[in-house]
Image (cartoon, coloured by chain):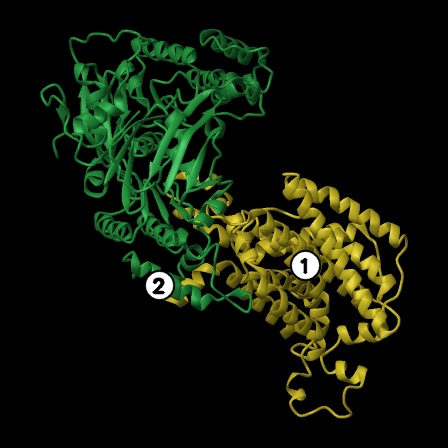
Chain colours: A yellow, B green
C-alpha cells in the first residue's frame, strides 16, 4: 500500500471530522450575512477555543484507554482563580498566568498519582476529584465576577492585527504583517500550543508510551515501556490543557464563574468531541488534531441553527430545543462511520475485546 | 538431574534452585539451568512442563519464589522486562508483544527511539526499521504500516527485528516460529546461525521437533516443572527424548469406556472445515454417545475447531451437518437452539464462562431463561427448582445460591459453568480444556460426569491439554498440528507415546494400531 493510502487509513476518523466540519461550516457561512469575513471567523474561533483545550485534555486520557470526568471541573477551578490573579502590572499578569497553568498541572498530576499508585479506575477517581475541583472553585469564587486584564482580553479575542496595535509594537504595520493580520488570535494561540506542546509530546517516548498503553498495556509492559511514567505524564499534561481552557475562558469572558453545570457540559462535550475526532474510546489511537476538528464539528452544528430561516421549509431546524438532538445524531453518524471496521472481524469474540 | 557436556566455557546465564508455584502447584521446582554464549540451546517439554515459566522468569515477566540467577558472571535479579533488556536479555514472545495500534517503525524502536533535539526522529526511526527489517529479510514490510494490519507471520518478523534492535547477548525465542511461513522459517534459521556465530546465546523454545534437530546445539528437557536432562544434539534419539518428556504413570481415575459392537449413529459430521490460516481441511464425525478428544500441542487449532462449530468464527469454509441441519451455525444463539442443541464449556471460565459478580443461581439459569420464563417474566419457582437440581446433581459445594459466583473455589466455579450448560439439555457438548487449574477431586467428578452423559446419549468433543485425560476419557482422539488433523487414534492406539509423537508430527510407534489420516 502506498504511504498516502496508509496515512488515509490511519486517520480515517479525523478525516471524517474534517469533512463534516467543512460541510457544516461552509453551509453556515454561506447563509450568514457576514459569512467568510474575519469578523465571523474571530467570533466563531473565540467560541470554540476553550472547548478545544478541554477536549485535548480529554484526548490525552482517552488515548491511555481511560476517561476523565474532571476536565470541565478543573477548567472551572482555573477559570475562577484566573478571575482573581490575571490582572495588574505586566509581571503580575505573567505570574497570574503561570499560577493558572500550575494549578492545571497540579490537578492533572493529582489525578495521575491517585490512578497510577492507587491502581484505581480513572472514571471513579476523576468523578471524585472533579467534585473536589468544583468545590474549590466555589470557594474561590462563590458568585460570578472578578476581573481579567482588559488589554489581554481584547488581544486574545480579536484578530492578530490587534496584538501590535494594543501593545504599541510599531507605528505602522510592516508589509509582511498584512498577510497574517486577519488571522483570529485564538487560532494563533492554538497553533502555538499544538506546535510547542502537542507535537513534541506526540513525538516523545512518554507520548509514544501513552499510545502503547492504550493499545495493549500488557505488550507495552513486556516491551519495557515505562508504564507509570507515561501515565503520569499524560494526566499531568491533560491537567495543563484543562488549565489552559479555564484561563482562556476567563480571558474571553473577562471574569470568572464557578458554575458546576457548565463544568459538566464541558466534560460531556469534550468526550463527544474526542469521539467525533476519531480517537477510539478503547485507547491507543487518535490524537489532538482530530479532536480539534471534532470540537469544530460540534460548534458548527450550534452555529448552523442560528442562520436557518424560521419561515423556510426547514424552519423547524431553527428551534434551539432541537439542538441537542442534532448534536446527538451527528455523534451517532460519526461513531458509526468510525466503527465500520467491526464488519471485517473474523473471530466474533474479538468484537468484545 | 544429569548434566552432560555443555562446553568448557563458563555459562553466560546460570540459574540455581529456581522455584515458582501457582496456588500450591509447582510450575518450576528446584531448577538448575545454564546457557552458554555462541550456542543455540533448545528447551523441550510437554504442555505445562515449565518451559514458559522458565522463560518468563529469565525475561523478568514474573519473579521466582526461590533461587538465584547470574548473568555474565554477576548475580542479577530481573525485576521487570526493562531490567532484563538493560543487561542484554531480550525475548521474542509467543504471545506477541508488539503493539497493534503503532506503526512498524514505532514498535521496533519502542523503548530506545532515535532522537533529535530530545524528540523522536521519525525519519531516523524509519531508516533503522528498514535496516532491521532487511536483516530479517522483510524488505517488503512498510515501516509506516500499522502493525495490527499486518498478517500474523509479518508481525512475528517485526517482533524478531525489534528484538535484534536491542543488541541482545541472550536472545530467547519462545515459539517464535509458530506463526511463520516456511520461507520465513528458513530466513530465521540463517539469522539465528549467524547470531550464534557472532557469539550470542540463544534459547529456543519450539514444539517442532525437526526445527530443533536443524537448529539446536544443546537440548534441555523439562517435565512437570523439573529440569530432566541437558545433552548435546545427536546424543539421544527421538524416542529417548519423547520418553524423557513423558516419564510418568497414567493414574487410575477414569471410568471404564464402553465396548462398542457397531458404530453409533452419526450426530455431527464435519467436512473440510477451514478458517483463515488457522484451520484447514478438518474432517471428522461424532457419533451418538461418543467422546472424541482433540489433542496435540497447545494452539494447533483445537480451540478454533470448537469456536467454529459453536458459531463464533466468521467466514468458516467447509460444511457441517448437525443432526439434519447443514451449514455452520451463524452464532452461539443458533448453536444453542433446540434443533442444534449444542453447548460450549469455554476455556477461560473467568472471561467467557461466568458473570463473576452475579449470583450462583443467576449464572446457572442464564442460558435457560427462555424455558424458565412465563411470558416475559422469569418464573422464580421454576428457576429455583432447576438451579437446585443442578447444584445437587453436580454436587456443587456452596453456601447459598444467591452468593456471588466469585466466592467459589476454581473447581466449583467450573461446575457452575458445566451446570449452566447442562441445564439447556445439550445433545452435543463441546468442552475446551474443562479441567485446567482445578483440583484432582473435581477433575475425577467431571470425568465420571462426562461418561455418564455420553452413556445417556450426549455426544461430546473434548479438547484437553492434558494427555492423560485424552487417554482416560476418549473413545477416539484427533491430533491437530498446524491447523490440520494429522492423526486419528482409536481404542488401544490411544497411548501417551502415540499422542506425544503425533503432537510433534512424528510417526506413531505402531502404525497398525493407529489410523493415519489419508490425504483427501
Whether tag 2 and tag 1 are in contact, CB under 8 A, the answer is: no
Classify residue B85 as left or right of residue A143: left
Disc number for residue B184: none
Residue B505: name its quadrant. top left
Classify residue A283 as left or right of residue B162: right
- Which residue, given by chain and number where applicable, does mark 2 sit on? B130
- Which residue, given by chain and number where applicable, does mark 1 sit on? A316
Residue B430 percent across, percent down from the top left:
34, 23
Who's the residue at 39% across and 41% down the image? B95
Residue A251: name its quadrant. bottom right
The quadrant of the picture occupied by the N terminus of chain B is: top left
Name the residue nearer the viewer: A246 or B382: A246
Name the residue nearer the viewer: B8 or A340: B8
Name the residue nearer the viewer: B196 or B468: B196
- The residues bearing labels 2 and 1 have C-alpha atoms spaced at a distance of 58 Å
Who's the residue at 24% across and 24% down the image? B244
Tell me which chain the residue with mark 1 is part of: A
Who's the residue at 87% across and 54% down the image? A140
Residue B220: name its quadrant. top left
The quadrant of the picture occupied by the C terminus of chain B is: top left
Residue B389 percent across, percent down from the top left:
49, 8
Amino acid at each position: 500500500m502506498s504511504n498516502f493510502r496508509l496515512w488515509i487509513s490511519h486517520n480515517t476518523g479525523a478525516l471524517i471530522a474534517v469533512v463534516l466540519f467543512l460541510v457544516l461550516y461552509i453551509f453556515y457561512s454561506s447563509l450568514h450575512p457576514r459569512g467568510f469575513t474575519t469578523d465571523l471567523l474571530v467570533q466563531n474561533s473565540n467560541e470554540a477555543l476553550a472547548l478545544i483545550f478541554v477536549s485535548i485534555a480529554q484526548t490525552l486520557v482517552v488515548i491511555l484507554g481511560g476517561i476523565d470526568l474532571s476536565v470541565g471541573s478543573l477548567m472551572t477551578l482555573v477559570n475562577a482563580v484566573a478571575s482573581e490573579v490575571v490582572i495588574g502590572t505586566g509581571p503580575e499578569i505573567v505570574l497570574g498566568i503561570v499560577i493558572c497553568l500550575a494549578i492545571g498541572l497540579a490537578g492533572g498530576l493529582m489525578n495521575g498519582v491517585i490512578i497510577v499508585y492507587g491502581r484505581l479506575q480513572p472514571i471513579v477517581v476523576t468523578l471524585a476529584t472533579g467534585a473536589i475541583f468544583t468545590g474549590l472553585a466555589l470557594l474561590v469564587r462563590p458568585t460570578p465576577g472578578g476581573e481579567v486584564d482588559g488589554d489581554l482580553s481584547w488581544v486574545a479575542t480579536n484578530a492578530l492585527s490587534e496584538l501590535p496595535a494594543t501593545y504599541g509594537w510599531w507605528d505602522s504595520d510592516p508589509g509582511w504583517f498584512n498577510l497574517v493580520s486577519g488571522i483570529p488570535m485564538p487560532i494563533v494561540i492554538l497553533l502555538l500550543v499544538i506546535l510547542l506542546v502537542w507535537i513534541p509530546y506526540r513525538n516523545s517516548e512518554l507520548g509514544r508510551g501513552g499510545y502503547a498503553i492504550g493499545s495493549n498495556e500488557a505488550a507495552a509492559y513486556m516491551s519495557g515501556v515505562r508504564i507509570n511514567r507515561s501515565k503520569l505524564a499524560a494526566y499531568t499534561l491533560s491537567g495543563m490543557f484543562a488549565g489552559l481552557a479555564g484561563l482562556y475562558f476567563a480571558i474571553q469572558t473577562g471574569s470568572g464563574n464557578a458554575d458546576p453545570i457548565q463544568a459538566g457540559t464541558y466534560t460531556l462535550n469534550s468526550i463527544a468531541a474526542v469521539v467525533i475526532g476519531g480517537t477510539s474510546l478503547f485507547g491507543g489511537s487518535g490524537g489532538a488534531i482530530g479532536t480539534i476538528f471534532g470540537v469544530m464539528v460540534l460548534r458548527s452544528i450550534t452555529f448552523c441553527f442560528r442562520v436557518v430561516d424560521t419561515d423556510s421549509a426547514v424552519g423547524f431546524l431553527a428551534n434551539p430545543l432541537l439542538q441537542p438532538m442534532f448534536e446527538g445524531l451527528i455523534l451517532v453518524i460519526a461513531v458509526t462511520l468510525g466503527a465500520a471496521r467491526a464488519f471485517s472481524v473474523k473471530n466474533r469474540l474479538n468484537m468484545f475485546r | 538431574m544429569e548434566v552432560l557436556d555443555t562446553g568448557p566455557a563458563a555459562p553466560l546465564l546460570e540459574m540455581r534452585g529456581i522455584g515458582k508455584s501457582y496456588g500450591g502447584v509447582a510450575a518450576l521446582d528446584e531448577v538448575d539451568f545454564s546457557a552458554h554464549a555462541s550456542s543455540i540451546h533448545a528447551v523441550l517439554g510437554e504442555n505445562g512442563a515449565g518451559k514458559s515459566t522458565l522463560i518468563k522468569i529469565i525475561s523478568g515477566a514474573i519473579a521466582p519464589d526461590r533461587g538465584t540467577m547470574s548473568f555474565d558472571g554477576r548475580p542479577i535479579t530481573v525485576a521487570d522486562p526493562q531490567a532484563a533488556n538493560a543487561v542484554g536479555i531480550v525475548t521474542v514472545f509467543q504471545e506477541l508483544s508488539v503493539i497493534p495500534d503503532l506503526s512498524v517503525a514505532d514498535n521496533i524502536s519502542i523503548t530506545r527511539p532515535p532522537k533529535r533535539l530530545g524528540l523522536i526522529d521519525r525519519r531516523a526511526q524509519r531508516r533503522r526499521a528498514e535496516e532491521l527489517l532487511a536483516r530479517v529479510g522483510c524488505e517488503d514490510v512498510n515501516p509506516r504500516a500499522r502493525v495490527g494490519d499486518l498478517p500474523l507471520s509479518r508481525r512475528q518478523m517485526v517482533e524478531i527485528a525489534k528484538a535484534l534492535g536491542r543488541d541482545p547477548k541472550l536472545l530467547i525465542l519462545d515459539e517464535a516460529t509458530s506463526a511463520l511461513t516456511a520461507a520465513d522459517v528458513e530466513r530465521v534459521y540463517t539469522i539465528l546461525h549467524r547470531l550464534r556465530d557472532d557469539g550470542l546465546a540463544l534459547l529456543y523454545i519450539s514444539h517442532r521437533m525437526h526445527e530443533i534437530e536443524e537448529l539446536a546445539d544443546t537440548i534441555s528437557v523439562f517435565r512437570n516443572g523439573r529440569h530432566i536432562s541437558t545433552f548435546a544434539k545427536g546424543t539421544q534419539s527421538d524416542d529417548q527424548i519423547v520418553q524423557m518428556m513423558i516419564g510418568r504413570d497414567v493414574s487410575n481415575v477414569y471410568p471404564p469406556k464402553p465396548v462398542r459392537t457397531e458404530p453409533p449413529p452419526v450426530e455431527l459430521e464435519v467436512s473440510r472445515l477451514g478458517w483463515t490460516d488457522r484451520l484447514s481441511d478438518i474432517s471428522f464425525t461424532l457419533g451418538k454417545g461418543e467422546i472424541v478428544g482433540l489433542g496435540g500441542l497447545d494452539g494447533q487449532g483445537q480451540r478454533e475447531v470448537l469456536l467454529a462449530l459453536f458459531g463464533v468464527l466468521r467466514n468458516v469454509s467447509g460444511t457441517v451437518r448437525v443432526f439434519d441441519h447443514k451449514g455452520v451455525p451463524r452464532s452461539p444463539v443458533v448453536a444453542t437452539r433446540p434443533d442444534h442443541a449444542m453447548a460450549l464449556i469455554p476455556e477461560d471460565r473467568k472471561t467467557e464462562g461466568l458473570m463473576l459478580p452475579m449470583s450462583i443461581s443467576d449464572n446457572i439459569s442464564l442460558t435457560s431463561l427462555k424455558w424458565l420464563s412465563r411470558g416475559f417474566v422469569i418464573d422464580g419457582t421454576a428457576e429455583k427448582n432447576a438451579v437446585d437440581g443442578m447444584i445437587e446433581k453436580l454436587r456443587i459445594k456452596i453456601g447459598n445460591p444467591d452468593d456471588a459466583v466469585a466466592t467459589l473455589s476454581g473447581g466449583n466455579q467450573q461446575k457452575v459453568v458445566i451446570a449452566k450448560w447442562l441445564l439447556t439439555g445439550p445433545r452435543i457438548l463441546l468442552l475446551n480444556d474443562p479441567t485446567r487449574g482445578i483440583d484432582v477431586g473435581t477433575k475425577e467428578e467431571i470425568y465420571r460426569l462426562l461418561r455418564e452423559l455420553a452413556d445417556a446419549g450426549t455426544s461430546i468433543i473434548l479438547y484437553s491439554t492434558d494427555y492423560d485425560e485424552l487417554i482416560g476419557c476418549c473413545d477416539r482422539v484427533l491430533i491437530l498440528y498446524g491447523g490440520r488433523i494429522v492423526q486419528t487414534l482409536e481404542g488401544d492406539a490411544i497411548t501417551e507415546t502415540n499422542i506425544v509423537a503425533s503432537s510433534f508430527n512424528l510417526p506413531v510407534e505402531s502404525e497398525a494400531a493407529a489410523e493415519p489420516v489419508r490425504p483427501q
